[in-house]
């Protein structure tokens, strides 16, 4: 039977803080206990072992013990991005002030789909987005919305591109009538190193993944403007329709920024919508040192930003912006129970027509609090600290006899690999063997709970492309922490080498 209402207090209203206080104390104590029990960046368990432990704890958790017991389990079984040896992904350690602000949002639970569910939060989001639009370089005509991240933002950018460019070409309202049949084939151009969400968005929008044309890149995974020009020209010669050019400001693997002004010029020349995916690199706008990397972003028709990367916010804190509010027209929606026209005419604003979602958290609140607390200058210092850390890490890789750097970092990430002993000897330079050792050493570090290191593959075909990745988003980490992480990689690589050799010897003995 359900507990009586008095034993299940609510978090809002005047009594809410009093109800939350003992629960928060219990949760915080459990977080501390679980993290101490983990004792490192990740639990030292195989996936199956952790899953069994989680299942057992979940089954045993009952009543008032459920919160502390499961919170301790969550802390124990988490990869901790605040640990200096956890550096695999674009997964930041959130600022304490942002988490506190996020707690206030959770307690009050405003929903951004109508003013009467979020009176103050509606205005705060509008003010925040105007400030972020100014940071990008947009003027007063800009508009935007908070999103769940780059994937949703990129979907919105390509949706507006589809509706406007294909609508203009066909003379139809694509958002009402659907993608025209029998017209020119739509094409979306993006680099071969762009995020997979571009293909996913094309599929969801009825364009098909095959509509996305991968454009050639250089060694640093930066889009080649000559290759883009050639691809657009071939598209026009074939009678196809260039719907959008999607440039990346901060690729996932290397942090590379595409040539934004050249991409803008070519998109305009061929009448394509210009979208910039700055989910990672948008954080550079906070830094006086790195902001010039994004020169030209203000030319984009739309931009994606993620503050849960180089913004140190809890997930999710994505932002979607358009340079001209009128280009948002195809997203406009009216629901009489949420944003009736007479309410808006009476001065009650609605954000419903700016988002793909209806019910939506006030995720902009923690960003607003963080900006007001630290300012651009304070956040910029955090960005610079992580950039310095990446530069120091790359230098340490160059100096290490068993590690090989792929390219210098642009933002806060770089690729490298472990090089086995005797690599120059043909017997030990088998690229498939090197790939296997690098892939396996990463799993060894996870299994032992020692470190969380990323793993990716360079573009191309064939063996020899596996690389390890460090994504450094902890501004409190030090160069010595990164050196310690690289030493752990080298130790794990040597252990995998020996295991590989032993396995080879055993195979040889069995074949005799």
Image (tube, rainbow, N blue to C red):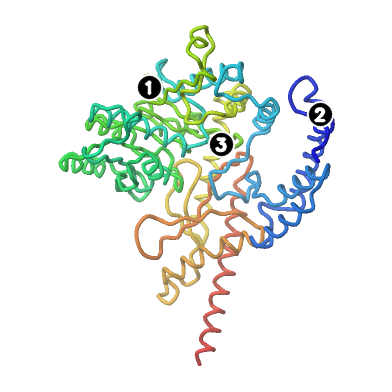
Q: Is residue 18 left or right of residue 139?
A: right
The secondary structure type at the circle numbered 3 is: loop
Callout 2: helix, strand or loop? helix
| Numbered-mark total | 3
**What numbered label is drawn on residue 143?**
none
Depth order, front residue of 122/175 = 175
| Residue highlighted by disc 1 | 329
Q: How far separated are the C-alphas under marks 3 and 1?
A: 28 Å
- Up the image or down, 422 lies above or below 221; here it is below
The residue that disc 3 covers is: 308
324 or 35, nearer to the observer? 324
Q: Earlier in the sequence, mark 2 or mark 3?
A: 2
For marks 3 and 1 on the same chain, the one whose residue lies earlier in the sequence = 3
What residue sits 74% from the left and 48% below the top? 35
Residue 247 in the image, given as x and y percentages of width and height: 36, 38
Q: Earlier in the sequence, mark 1 or mark 2?
A: 2
In this rendering, the answer to whether 166 lies above or below 35 is above
Looking at the picture, tell me which residue is in the foreground, 345 or 276. Answer: 345
- Which residue is rendered at x = 40% and y = 25% of the image? 322
Residue 277, x across and y down, in percent: 41, 36
Q: CA distance from mark 2 to mark 3?
A: 29 Å
| Image position of 172 with respect to 431: above or below | above
- Crowding near the residue tagged with mark 1, few <14, some 14–19, many ≥20 C-alpha atoms within 10 Å: few
Q: Residue at x 69, y 62 (%)?
A: 49
> Disc 2 designates what residue?
19
10 Å crowding of disc 2: few (<14), some (14-19), many (20+): some
Q: Is residue 129 left or right of residue 79?
A: left
């Amino acid at each position: 039977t359900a507990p009586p209402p008095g034993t299940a207090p609510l978090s809002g209203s005047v009594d809410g803080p009093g109800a939350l206080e003992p629960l928060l104390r219990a949760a915080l104590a459990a977080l501390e206990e679980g993290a101490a029990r983990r004792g490192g960046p990740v639990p030292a368990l195989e996936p199956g072992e952790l899953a069994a432990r989680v299942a057992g704890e979940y089954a045993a958790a009952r009543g008032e013990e459920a919160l502390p017991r499961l919170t301790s389990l969550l802390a124990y079984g988490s990869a901790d991005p605040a640990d200096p040896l956890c550096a695999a992904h674009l997964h930041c350690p959130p600022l304490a002030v942002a988490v506190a602000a996020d707690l206030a949002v959770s307690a009050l639970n405003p929903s951004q789909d109508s003013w009467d569910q979020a009176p103050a939060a509606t205005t705060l989001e509008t003010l925040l987005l105007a400030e972020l639009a100014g940071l990008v370089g947009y003027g007063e005509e800009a508009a935007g919305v908070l999103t769940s991240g780059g994937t949703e933002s990129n979907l919105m950018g390509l949706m507006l591109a589809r509706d406007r460019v294909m609508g203009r070409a066909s003379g139809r309202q694509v958002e009402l009538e659907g993608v025209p049949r029998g017209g020119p084939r739509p094409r979306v151009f993006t680099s071969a190193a762009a995020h997979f969400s571009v293909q996913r968005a094309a599929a969801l929008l009825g364009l098909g993944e095959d509509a996305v044309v991968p454009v050639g890149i250089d060694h640093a995974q930066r889009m080649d403007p000559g290759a883009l020009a050639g691809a657009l020209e071939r598209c026009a010669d074939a009678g196809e329709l260039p719907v959008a050019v999607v440039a990346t400001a901060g690729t996932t693997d290397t942090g590379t920024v595409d040539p934004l002004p050249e991409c803008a010029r070519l998109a305009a020349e061929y009448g394509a919508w210009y979208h910039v995916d700055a989910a990672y690199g948008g954080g550079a706008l906070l830094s006086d040192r790195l902001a010039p990397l994004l020169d030209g972003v203000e030319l984009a028709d739309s931009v994606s930003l993620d503050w849960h990367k180089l913004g140190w916010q809890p997930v999710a804190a994505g932002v979607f912006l358009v340079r001209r509010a009128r280009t948002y027209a195809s997203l406009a929606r009216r629901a009489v129970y949420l944003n009736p026209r007479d309410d808006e005419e009476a001065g009650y604003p609605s954000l419903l027509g700016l988002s793909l979602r209806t019910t939506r958290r006030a995720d902009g609140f923690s960003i607003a609090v963080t900006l007001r607390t630290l300012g651009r200058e304070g956040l910029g210092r955090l960005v610079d600290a992580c950039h310095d850390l990446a530069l120091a890490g790359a230098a340490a890789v160059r100096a290490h006899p068993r590690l090989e750097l792929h390219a210098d970092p642009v933002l806060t990430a770089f690729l490298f690999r472990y090089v086995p002993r005797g690599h120059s000897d043909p017997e030990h330079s088998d690229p498939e063997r090197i790939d296997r050792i690098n892939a396996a050493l990463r799993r060894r570090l996870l299994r032992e709970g020692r470190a969380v290191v990323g793993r990716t593959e360079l573009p191309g075909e064939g063996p020899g492309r596996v690389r390890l990745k460090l994504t450094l988003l902890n501004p409190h980490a030090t160069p010595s922490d990164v050196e310690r992480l690289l030493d752990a990689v080298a130790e794990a690589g040597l252990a995998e080498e020996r295991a590989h050799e032993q396995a080879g010897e055993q195979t040889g003995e069995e074949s005799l």
